[in-house]
């Protein structure tokens, strides 16, 4: 299939992009989330503003935390030494998006603006408390990832607003992992679990970050699972408790499809939480 | 003596054009002034068409015309069903190229748009406004055959298109009543989407001056397409030229003649310009035939000692909204006749009910009826084994037909040509290390790991088939093939065949047959196919028939040429024909090795005709029509080893062993490739593929996002073995191998998974065995 | 909109409708029909090309996005009339049957082995999740790619 007709504007700067966008327009970055939807004619914006060449949106910088340009590709993030050092789970998640062709051109900004609940990066961003930096005609603002993802394919972005970058805290002193149970057809997540553990010198867990995606309409931070791990030595009993807790954490947000129903995905969230903890602990 | 070309795994001659992107498939062919056709398709599974408003579409840029069935009128006859099963009370409801008043499945064509570019054609198709009155829909074939189901065609009462019975019901009942053990299961053979990687496409060019129509299309059988296009358009058959250029896989889905091929033809005739249509994958999943779709109620009778006594089944076969070209033959002739498989079982009974539903029409999909039979048989053998507490391998071993070389009649009335089932069976078990595996399985279970093994012994009927049989079972065509071997004056060979390979490597294997018979270097032989004007009549490539049937025609045509060459060589060397010896493309006189004539020299002299023996015609070309005396029956044993992760239900296919016997292998690499691909296709039915509809008839697996195509990381490397049992009735002894992998692998993988789950108490799961279903079955069994 | 795209070393300037997908630009505008279309959902990989040296599914990019870029298609993979080693390996190992997935499969595999010489069979199988073949059961494709990967590691 192929897209509907639209007007095309190539923006050279964020300001130009913001001044060009119309009410029925959309921003086009890598296009690897938007174009598939347009090809199936499930979405038909009348205007595309191409932000793929805006220098301000490129690049990954590390300075007490990561600032990842919205235009950074999944592959660039997955292979970035800074990202691997400060947030290994994010590098891992970006390395599991789609296939190599998708990762080469799909961008983090486009991915999170699309807000597919079964995509991988949002789960990590929500788990680690990243924030999404947004610019609009009225100025810029920053929204925590947990608030950014509102519902199925729904974000906190207002019309005409553009994601410029994502800030990710430095978790180089955490043990983190993102583990995915891929849907065999689409390779999106049936469930994806991100775990980041801050361990104390005495072997106890200072605190834990846990989020689940795929099984839910949006990536969900799992506070009771985090509580079940904090203060423990992350032994089997604690992990089993967290695995139970995670199922209740996501219970009001469950999503599924005809082949992999909600109930199954909910149970698998528990299983994959355990596997994610094991991977994080290496 | 050089290495024999027959039996050598040489590289394929097809490949240079394919690995460089130079091959031209239908959509790759461009004609100036072409119009693109887009089809307005029903979004409802069952609805009356109240009105169609095309005014907005007609006004759009680049749009030349919009047509509905009213515009076509009697310009196109309905698409025929070409397999009319006798004694089955068959109804063949009208299948118009565009719906008349009513749509019967999602994707049913309602109108066509012709525009100067494909994007604009689709824009305009989206702008055609159709008002529908939605009707209740039914998808499940058993439900569609039941009381109160919505009626899909007024002239198909109860939605039952045919009811075919094989065997004697009372005799079967007697066997079952007297048996020690009867096992039963309701088996769902889910709908599958054939998914040839090349979607379908068609381009028609009508020349008003000559009244000739050329149709390029994705066809497995261009001569059948010519036949049907001629019939539906009313053009004389000799004015229709059908060309199947490079074709990107078929798996049965490019056998039927669809509305789209008829519509581009009609539009080109109407407008006098070329018209092209190329399917999108989304369209492909909605409108190109689906496979399988059986609900089977199956029983098997056995003795306590493991002797298999009989099998019987009632099959509800979903036909979809219309009866596709060969559809009625699939769940009947190609299905029931396989019910004894490789076993000595004496009693068979099948009642197969073809049911109209609001799904996409079904038809032949790789294996076509035989996988559905082999699955039920192998499933029931495992059930018998479990019930009587015997190793399923022992049950099979006990019941295999002993080796035979020339004919073995079974209870379904088929006469199997040749076989040594025990040899293939034991070889596969050796390769798998069956005994060792059972020990590993036990120790793994103690560690909470669930390993399983599935073993399938099979035979199948292919190389379709004798034309007399085709006629007797209502197939509206012959099943012979023809071929011409034409040698040019410089000694190069053109072999023209009526069959139409589309990925099988037949250009290579068939050239190897000719090289073997005549001694021409294989690189000097071109095999030409796919164009009804260039090639002799043929019935097409399907049913694993091209090597067995076309290959036989070529071998016999080659032998005629060789006979001629021998006489001419004798004449040229002034020797007695009886004194002529032949080796490696050279004719020599016994006792005078210096005197020789190469096949190329003989060919030249035959063309020059300066010095011919009395009564011999000039030229060096022979044709052969070959009608096989029987089917061929390849056979073998497949074994799968799996591990199931009980925590998630995920299946890991760890090993796959296939021992197949297709007679002498002309090109072992090509044979292996057919088995590899077939195994994955069949295993994927067990593991992941399945079309799913909503209750109102919407296809929920409408793209590869939801329909799970098998991927490289789901499979191990395959372990292949072979035995060689020639077919006694075939000129070079070969049997077909295009479908064996698909036929054998589904039950093999399924039974392996159920074997792994046996300690957990799971006895049945509907295919495909998704992790969610496996996990649920484990939970239910534990509860 | 005016674009200039270098394809197989030749600059092509065209005025395109902005919605034109790169794959249609290649196939329809340039008649480079070796690049195929096998799905609507960026999954089958039949349309795989290299854009500025990186693997791309050309059905998932607008031609206008490729303005100024260098594209290599299957028609441009051979050098000096010699098959690329991946083309040779597919031929030698019977890594194709109907050939429709083959251009994309070869383009994807060529880039993979360039970036991952010595890749294992498991890595190859995992990488190929973005390219679907219906004919071969992948066995001989994996064998072909492994042959080139092994050779690349040895070089």
Image (cartoon, coloured by chain):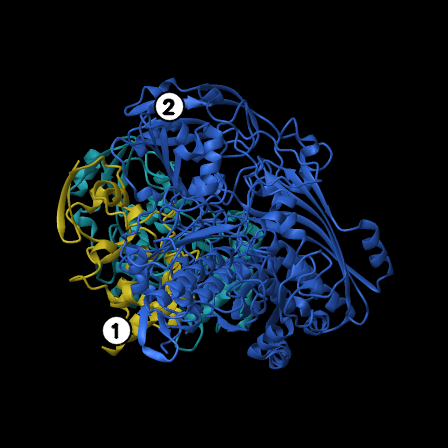
Q: Give the yellow chain's letter.
A: C
A85 and C42: which is toward the camera: C42
Tell me which residue sits at (20%, 47%) in the image.
C66
Tell me which residue sits at (54%, 47%) in the image.
B691
State the residue position of label 1: C152
Q: Give the blue chain's letter.
A: B
Q: Is residue B353 above or below residue B641?
A: above
Q: Position of residue C145 (x, y in %)?
A: 33, 68
Q: Indicate left or right for B652 with B138 as reference.
A: left
B46 and A156: which is toward the camera: B46
Tell me which residue sits at (39%, 57%) in the image.
B614
**Quarter where residue B581 is shown:** bottom left
State the residue position of label 2: B270
Q: Chain of mark 1?
A: C
* Residue A206 visible in the current orientation: no
Distance CA(mark 2)–CA(mark 1): 57 Å
Q: Position of residue A179 (x, y in %)?
A: 43, 63
C51 and B555: which is toward the camera: B555
């Amino acid at each position: 299939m192929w897209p509907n007709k639209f007007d095309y504007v190539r923006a050279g700067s964020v300001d130009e992009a913001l001044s060009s966008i119309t009410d029925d327009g959309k921003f086009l970055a890598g296009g690897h989330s938007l174009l598939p939807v347009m090809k199936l004619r499930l979405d038909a914006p009348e205007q595309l503003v191409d932000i793929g060449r805006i220098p301000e949106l490129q690049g990954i910088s590390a300075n007490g935390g990561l600032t990842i340009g919205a235009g950074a590709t999944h592959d660039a993030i997955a292979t970035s030494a800074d990202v691997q050092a400060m947030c290994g789970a994010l590098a891992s998640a970006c390395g599991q998006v789609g296939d190599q062709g998708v990762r080469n051109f799909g961008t983090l900004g486009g991915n999170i603006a699309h807000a597919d609940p079964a995509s991988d990066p949002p789960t990590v961003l929500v788990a680690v408390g990243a924030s999404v930096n947004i610019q609009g005609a009225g100025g810029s603002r920053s929204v925590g990832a947990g608030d950014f993802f509102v519902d199925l394919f729904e974000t906190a972005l207002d019309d005409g607003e553009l994601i410029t970058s994502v800030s990710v805290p430095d978790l180089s002193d955490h043990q983190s992992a993102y583990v995915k149970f891929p849907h065999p057809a689409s390779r999106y997540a049936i469930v994806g679990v991100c775990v980041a553990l801050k361990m104390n010198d005495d072997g106890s867990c200072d605190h834990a970050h846990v989020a689940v995606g795929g099984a839910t309409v949006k990536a969900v931070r799992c506070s009771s699972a985090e509580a079940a791990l904090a203060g423990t030595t992350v032994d089997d009993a604690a992990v089993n408790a967290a695995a139970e807790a995670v199922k209740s954490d996501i219970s009001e947000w469950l999503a599924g499809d005809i082949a992999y129903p909600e109930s199954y995905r909910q149970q698998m969230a528990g299983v994959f939480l355990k596997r994610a903890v094991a991977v994080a602990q290496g | 003596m050089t290495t024999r070309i027959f039996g050598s795994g040489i590289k394929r001659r097809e490949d240079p054009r394919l690995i460089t992107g130079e091959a031209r498939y239908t959509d790759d062919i461009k004609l100036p002034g072409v119009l693109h056709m887009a089809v307005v398709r029903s979004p409802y599974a069952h609805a009356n068409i109240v009105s169609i408003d095309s005014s907005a579409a007609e006004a759009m840029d680049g749009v030349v015309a919009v047509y509905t069935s009213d515009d076509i009128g009697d310009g196109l006859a309905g698409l025929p069903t070409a397999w009319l099963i006798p004694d089955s009370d068959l109804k063949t409801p009208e299948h118009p190229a565009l719906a008349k008043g009513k749509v019967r499945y999602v994707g049913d064509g309602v109108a066509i748009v012709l525009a100067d570019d494909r994007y604009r054609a689709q824009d305009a198709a989206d702008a055609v406004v159709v008002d529908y009155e939605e009707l209740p829909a039914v998808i499940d074939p058993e439900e569609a055959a039941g009381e109160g189901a919505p009626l899909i065609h007024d002239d198909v009462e109860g939605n039952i298109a045919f009811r075919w019975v094989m065997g004697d019901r009372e005799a079967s009942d007697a066997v079952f009543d007297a048996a020690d053990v009867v096992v039963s299961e309701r088996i769902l053979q889910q709908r599958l989407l054939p998914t040839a990687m090349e979607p379908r496409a068609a381009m028609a060019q009508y020349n008003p001056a000559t009244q000739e129509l050329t149709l390029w299309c994705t066809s497995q059988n261009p001569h059948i397409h010519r036949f049907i296009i001629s019939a539906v358009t009313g053009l004389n058959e000799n004015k229709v030229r059908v060309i199947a250029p490079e074709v990107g896989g078929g798996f049965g889905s490019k056998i039927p003649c669809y509305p789209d091929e008829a519509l581009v033809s009609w539009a080109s005739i109407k407008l006098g310009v070329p018209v092209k249509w190329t399917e999108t994958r989304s369209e492909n999943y909605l409108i190109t035939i689906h496979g399988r779709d059986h609900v089977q109620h199956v029983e098997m009778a056995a003795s306590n000692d493991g002797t298999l006594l009989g099998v019987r089944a009632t099959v509800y076969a979903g036909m979809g909204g219309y009866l596709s070209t060969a559809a009625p033959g699939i769940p009947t002739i190609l299905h029931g006749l396989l019910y004894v498989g490789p076993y000595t079982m004496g009693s068979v009974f099948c009642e197969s009910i073809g049911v109209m539903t609001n799904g996409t029409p079904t038809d032949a999909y790789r294996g076509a009826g035989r996988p559905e039979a082999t699955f039920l048989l192998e499933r029931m053998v495992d059930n018998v084994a479990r019930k009587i507490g015997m190793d399923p391998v022992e049950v099979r071993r006990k019941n295999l037909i002993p080796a035979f070389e020339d004919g073995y009649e079974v209870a379904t009335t088929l006469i199997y040509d040749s076989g040594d089932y025990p040899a293939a069976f034991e070889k596969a078990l050796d390769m798998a290390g069956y005994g060792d595996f059972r020990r590993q399985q036990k120790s793994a279970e103690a560690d909470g790991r669930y390993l399983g093994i599935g073993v399938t012994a099979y035979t199948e009927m292919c190389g379709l088939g004798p034309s007399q049989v085709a006629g007797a079972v209502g197939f509206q065509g012959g099943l012979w093939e023809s071929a011409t071997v034409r040698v040019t004056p410089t000694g190069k060979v053109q072999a023209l065949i009526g069959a139409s390979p589309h990925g099988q490597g037949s250009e290579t294997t068939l050239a190897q047959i000719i090289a073997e018979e005549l001694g021409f270097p294989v690189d000097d032989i071109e095999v030409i196919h796919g164009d009804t004007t260039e090639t002799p009549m043929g019935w097409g490539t399907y049913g694993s028939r091209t090597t067995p049937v076309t290959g036989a025609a070529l071998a016999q045509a080659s032998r005629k040429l060789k006979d001629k060459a021998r006489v001419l060589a004798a004449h040229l060397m002034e020797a007695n024909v009886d004194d002529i010896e032949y080796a490696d493309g050279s004719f020599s006189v016994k006792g005078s090795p210096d005197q020789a004539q190469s096949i190329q020299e003989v060919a030249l002299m035959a063309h020059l005709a300066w010095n011919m023996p009395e009564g011999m015609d000039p030229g060096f070309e022979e044709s052969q029509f070959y009608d096989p005396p029987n089917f061929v029956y390849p056979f073998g044993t497949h074994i799968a080893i799996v591990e199931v992760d009980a925590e998630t239900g995920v299946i890991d296919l760890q090993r796959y062993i296939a021992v197949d016997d297709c007679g002498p292998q002309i090109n072992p690499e090509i044979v292996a490739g057919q088995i590899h691909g077939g195994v994955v296709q069949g295993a994927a039915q067990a593991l992941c593929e399945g079309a799913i509809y909503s209750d109102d008839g919407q296809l929920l697996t409408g793209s590869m996002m939801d329909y799970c195509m098998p991927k490289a990381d789901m499979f191990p490397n395959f372990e292949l073995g072979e035995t060689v049992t020639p077919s006694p009735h075939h000129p070079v002894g070969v049997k077909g191998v295009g479908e064996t992998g698909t036929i054998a692998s589904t039950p093999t993988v399924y039974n392996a998974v159920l074997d792994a789950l046996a300690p957990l108490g799971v006895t049945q799961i509907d295919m495909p065995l998704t992790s969610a279903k496996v996990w649920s079955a484990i939970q239910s069994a534990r509860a | 909109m005016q674009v200039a795209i270098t394809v197989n070393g030749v600059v092509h300037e065209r005025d395109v409708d902005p919605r034109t997908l790169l794959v249609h630009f290649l196939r329809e505008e340039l008649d480079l029909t070796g690049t195929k279309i096998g799905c609507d959902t960026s999954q089958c990989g039949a349309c795989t090309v290299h854009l500025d040296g990186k693997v791309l599914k050309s059905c998932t990019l607008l031609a206008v996005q490729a303005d100024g870029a260098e594209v290599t298609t299957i028609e441009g993979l051979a050098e000096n009339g010699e098959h690329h080693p991946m083309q040779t390996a597919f031929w030698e190992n019977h890594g194709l049957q109907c050939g429709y997935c083959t251009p994309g499969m070869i383009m994807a595999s060529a880039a993979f082995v360039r970036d991952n010489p010595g890749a294992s069979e498991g890595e190859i199988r995992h990488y190929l999740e973005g390219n679907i073949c219906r004919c071969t059961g992948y066995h001989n494709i994996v064998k072909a790619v492994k042959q080139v990967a092994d050779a690349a590691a040895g070089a």
